[in-house]
Image (cartoon, helix red, strand yellow):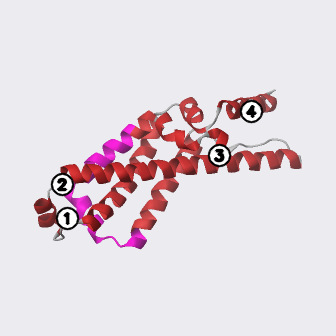
Amino acid sequence: MVRANRPWRLVPGLSKALAAALATGAIATVDDTVWSLATSLGTPRLVVATVGSVGLMIGWLIVDANLWHRTTEGSPEARQRSVLYNTSTLVTVSIGAAVCYVGLMVVSFVWALFVLNGHVFASATRHPLNAQNYCTLSWFVASIATVGGALGSGLESDEAIRAAAYSTREQERRHMLQGEHDG
């Protein structure tokens, strides 16, 4: 089910969320407060920022677009089917959010290479602008941009999010199940 949903297509399918994430990342990359924070954070805090931002995006997409399947049936089969659908949704959205995060990290790195000045960076942070600091900054900016993208996904319609998250067949299956419960 996850492969049929093509989770790698989630990001381009959410154009407003992607635009918000890219704009947030572009602005964060040139902010000296973000530079100072990035150079002062250790790996454990950067990992927490990553997990938190990706988790926020996953949760926001699932809750905001009502992607979580709830069954009103009490049968074990219905509960099992609900668990299967929710698991596939969680894995699909998680892979899509991870792809988004990695893409934002790469874009942030390239953008930083293009716009940052080593002298300005060093005077603001008291750290040289070297490969490690480019990587750390890109890592931190990807977390900030992911939160921006999660918030930007609120501008997407529920239908657009479902179209990005689910294959056509999965959408038809869910619509059919919803129709059975409504009727």
User: Marks 4/1: CA distance?
Assistant: 52 Å
Name the residue tied to disc 1: 129
Residue stretch in magenta:
19-45
- Label 3 to label 1, Cα distance in Å? 41 Å
Residue at the spot 31% in from the left edge and 42% down from the top edge: 23
Residue 173: image tag: 4
Which mark sits nearer the N-terminus, 2 or 4? 2
Q: Residue at x 10, y 62 (%)?
A: 119
The disc labelled 1 sits on which kind of residue?
Answer: Leu
Look at the picture and state if 86 lies above or below 118: above
Query: Which mark is in front, 3 or 1?
Result: 1
Numbered disc in front, either 3 or 2: 2
- What amino acid does circle 2 point to? Leu
Spatial CA span between label 3 and label 2:
39 Å
Counting from the top left corner in percent of width and height, residue 114 is at 21, 49
- The question of residue 28 being in magenta is answered with yes
Q: Secondary structure at mark 4?
A: helix
Sequence-wise first label, 3 or 2: 3
Which quadrant, please, contains the N terminus? top right
* Depth check, front residue: 112 or 29: 112
Name the dominant secondary structure of the magenta segment: helix
| Nearer-N-terminus badge (1/2) | 2
Q: Position of residue 59 (x, y in %)?
A: 55, 50
